[in-house]
Image (spheres, helix red, strand yellow):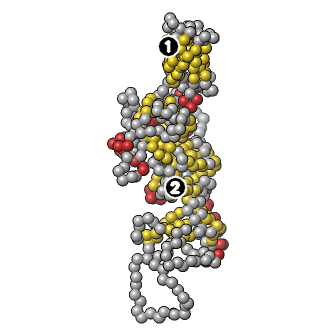
Amino acid sequence: MAIETDLNVSPYYDDYDESKDYHRVLFKPAVALQARELTQAQTILQTQIERFGQHIFKEGSIIKGCAMTFDNQIKYVKILDKTIAGTDVNTANITEGMYLRGQTANLVSRVSLSASGLESQNPDLNTIFFNYIKSDNTTTYYANREILEVYSATTSVANIQVTAIGDNYNNTDTVSISSTNGGNATATVNTYSNGSVESITVTANGTGFTAADYPTANVSGNSTASGATLRVNLNEEMRVTVGNSSFFDSGGNTEFNVTGKAYEMRVQDGVIFQKGHFQRFAEQNIIVSKYTNRPNERVVGIATTESTVNNSVDTTLLDNASGYANENAPGADRLKLIPTLSVNSKSVAESSNNFLKIDEFQHGEVVQKNQNAVLSSLGDAIAQRTYEESGDYVVDPFVLSTEGRAGNTTHLSLTVGEGKGYIQGKRFELTGTTRLPLAKATTTANADPQQVSINYGNYVDVDELVGQFGAEENDMVLILDTQWIQ
């Protein structure tokens, strides 16, 4: 699939027509150079790369890198539509690397992702995904209705409060502000006439402070000074409120809870092939399932977004021939391709011709993973040869079994364990247990007349069977007249 951006428009006029079979732009002296000729020269070359690439690789195939990690313990918290200041919450401003700090128990967490929502779209409220990193007491979760302070990855000192005024201080005493990460913050002391501390004036806010390493401050006075305590406040981005139990589901569906666990997938940087281009893939993470850590029938793949960029968006496109960005020489625009992770339901992913899944999830497990390059036409030719030589075969056996489905009277589950094999020459691997619905035998059929052999020994009528006997290992089977509780 080629790019979808139409470049045969003003001001580019890329009217390349492959039916004309032009394969080179032949520039000539004393003939004016056309902008479209430079663009078409790129298109001709790119068309050749695209045709070759599509013969070798499937769309969305990982060429290099893109190592994957999974986190089924990442936490989420749903927040109300308005900040404490009364403005609308914009989760786009709450990004990876920022911090949350609970006002109730000073519980600190580091943000991984965020998702927009509304209270009217319950359970899809504004949601923040994070990992706890620090607690000042035994509290392990943010509480319903708790106010959360949102901080940038690094920030500065906002002010210093006096929580105990002490005795025998003076205005020449030193205020020391301590932090492992931040620095360059300074302050002065203001005292009452009796020597107690009245206030602290911040004279330099400093830089590099984090909510994960909240700074402390104290006043260094003379030998008789004592008792003054201070509290440092950092500059916040906003304050938000955790949702309350009114958003819960009366039927007990935990996905309506305002706090809980989600499932995150992270992919390291690498190279992928999509839309005819070999694209750089920047490290990314995505939430596979927002309000449960057991994603089911979910598929993660890669989608590419297209855009054109000019010098008003990126000033580095200005002509730098003079050693600086020349505003009077804007230069050419750029076509930008950004590959991004995308999550879909299994049915949507399978119906798309241009979506190559890299991971498929069932019941909280990764059951299929395409982390290596997936071949296209070349792969089909290799597969045909393999199939003609060897047929279908199994390398690592897929263990089959059955299990019941709670409350289901018509179906049970056929479980297919991890394994590896070749079907029509193509490699097929399951990295987790896959479950398929299997109809129970609930009907009967009569065959009359029918000869039936009676050459068999003792037998037992079994009304219902789940699982299988280990015939190959000669497992012992116990037949009991009452239920056996192990």
- Which residue lies at the image location 44% right of the left edge and 39% below the top edge? 143
The quarter of the displayed image where residue 447 is located: bottom left
226 w.r.t. 148: above or below: above
Between circles 2 and 1, the one closer to the viewer is: 1
Position of residue 322 in the picture relative to residue 441 (left or right): right
* Sequence-wise first label, 2 or 1: 1
> Could you say where residue 278 lies in the image, as x and y percent from the top left?
59, 47
Residue reaching furthest to the top: 193
Badges 2 and 1: C-beta atoms under 8 Å apart?
no
State the residue at coordinates (55%, 90%): 457
State the quadrant of the C terminus. bottom right
Which one is in front, 469 or 18? 469
Q: CA distance from mark 2 to mark 1?
A: 55 Å
Q: Nearer the viewer, residue 404 or 52?
A: 404
Nearest the viewer among 383 and 117 is: 117
Task: Check residue 364 in the rendering and tell me which mark sits there, or answer none.
Answer: 2
Q: Is residue 99 above or below residue 59?
A: above
Q: Nearer the viewer, residue 331 or 173?
A: 173
Q: Is residue 91 visible?
A: yes
Name the side, left or right, on which 427 lies relative to 82.
right
Task: Report the residue marked by disc 1.
Answer: 199
Residue 77 rendering spot, x and y as whole percentages = 45, 41
* Residue 303 higher or lower than 156, as above or below: below
What element does badge 1 sit on? strand
- Image mark for residue 51: none
Query: Residue flagged by tag 1: what amino acid is it?
Result: Ser
Q: Amino acid at mark 2?
A: Gly
Q: Residues within 10 Å of mark 2 (few under 14, many from 20)?
A: some
| Whether residue 24 is visible | no
